[in-house]
Image: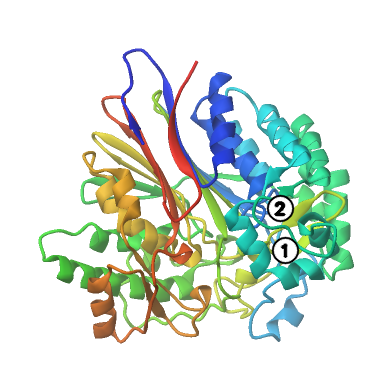
Amino acid sequence: MTEPTAPGSRRVAVAAPHPAALDAAAEAVAAGGDAIDAALAAAAALTVVYPHQCSIGGDLVALVRRPGHGVTAVVSAGAAPSGIDVAALAQQERMPRQGAQTVTVPGVVAGWQAIDALGGRLGLRPALLRAAGLAAEGAPVSAGLARAVALREHEIRADAGMTDVFGDGVGGLLGTGDRLVQPALAATLTELAADPGAMYRGRIAASITARLRELGGAHTEADFAAHEAELAEPEQAAVAGVRWWVAPPPTQGVVLLGILPEALADGAGAADRTAEFVDAVHRAALVRQAELGDPRGGPIDVAAMTDPRDTGRAGALPRAGRALGDTVAVTAADTDGTVVTLIQSVYQLFGSGILDPGTGVVLHNRGSAFSTDPAHPGHVGPGLRPPHTLLPVIAETDGLVVALGCQGGSAQPWILAQVASDLVDADSDPVAVLGRPRFVVGARDLGHEEMTLVAEPGTDDAIAAAGVLGLPVARTAGPVDEAGHVQTVRLHADGHLDAASDPRADGRAVVLHAN
């Protein structure tokens, strides 16, 4: 969506994957909020209406650009509990896919607090109370949520908390258009509106940790109380005349920086450029698997990921399974120069498969991304964070600031790289760019036992390049979720805003008039 800005007026552009998020953002802007408030209102609403993709029981990574302050990374990725049994896990080939052992301390709420402190005008209370009302009154089950419920029926029925929320009360499960009412979550959000820190101490933390221990976890209230969002210097690079910012490890932002030279290359024919890009993606995927981890657990070879051109590397990080519907991205930009890209996630559909009845919180399974190999940079350990897929991006030219984020698990670098080269062109149509066919490369995260290129129709050059590299190809019948749900907003030097929401998702983009 594009809309010019009248002289002297202030506007906020927002893109998100669900209409309820845009409604919440509009209410925040109408109340005098800025891009930070709009993004946080959208994010809070999404934890209610998109519980298969995100919740306050998940993690958050964001970038915030403020005039006069540059870009700040907010990394609120939770750690494994201090009492986790590393020796027992080391005997397993890979981490469990779901269950209490895959739950790390949830970072979303602490992340919201950190973002709000960077310049929000309204505070978190209005956004959390609005989300609480949405949970109490109920919201229609979207088509995407209904598909997720059907796909995860076994896991939902295996957990009493999940069954109580996503069951229809007569033995079935909720479907499209049914009303999703979450009274326990409403009470939790109301409590957090009064004190967001209550997520990490008192009743909420006690309830969640007690439930996890019942199910075999080692979590304690002290583990929750120890969590803090990290304000970090972003990793950055200048490529093809564009300045790029991404969050640092344990997130995979540096992997995107490593493939941007090929993604933004010009001068060769289209087929040759695509072949070079696919080759770079393949190498970057292997390096990411071999090198990404938590700097708290030992040195991380960032240089290898920002220059993944050693073809002798081979990745070995065990993955838990397909990463479908794992993430939501919200992007927002204000004509005052504030730009936000925020990603929050339960990792895989419905995360750990655990919903704490006492709080109504769906808990993520981000810990399933740990390696059980003690020698791996991404090894599991007390107080360590798993290798993280969340990848918010800000890019800036002399005439444009672009915020990007997407769903897509480990494939997020390749998804974003395929749209970035055109989105940094101020004359491009962001709606058209996000609608183009894409490909992704992955292995277990895409449901394949070996590295495979998954190709939407219209990506013939990438398919041909995969053949040359000996990469297996899985063709899709049309656009697919695996190719990502990209959200983008752009602030132009002349003050006008435009935005787009990926047609693969259920959302939209709006430009709002600010008071």
> Based on the displayed image, in which of its 4 quarters is residue 46 positioned?
top right
Name the residue that disc number 1 marks.
Answer: 103
Q: CA distance from mark 1 to mark 2?
A: 9 Å
Q: Is residue 215 visible?
A: yes
Residue appearing at x 24%, y 63% in the figure: 262
Which residue is more in the foreground, 291 or 405?
405
- Three-letter code, disc 2: Gly
Residue flagged by tag 1: what amino acid is it? Answer: Val
Badge 2: how crowded within 10 Å, few (<14), some, or many (20+)?
Answer: many
Residue for badge 2: 57
Q: In which quadrant of the rendered view does residue 143 lie?
A: bottom right
Expressed as whole percent of the image width and height from the top left, the position of residue 331 reads 46, 41
Q: Nearer the viewer, residue 147 or 420?
A: 147
Picture coordinates of residue 503, whole percent (x, y): 41, 52
Circles 1 and 2 in contact, beta carbons < 8 Å: yes
Residue 289, relative to residue 138: is it above or below? below
| 347 relative to 205 in the view: left or right | left
Circle nearer the N terminus (1, 2): 2
Question: Residue drawn 83% across and 39% down?
Answer: 187
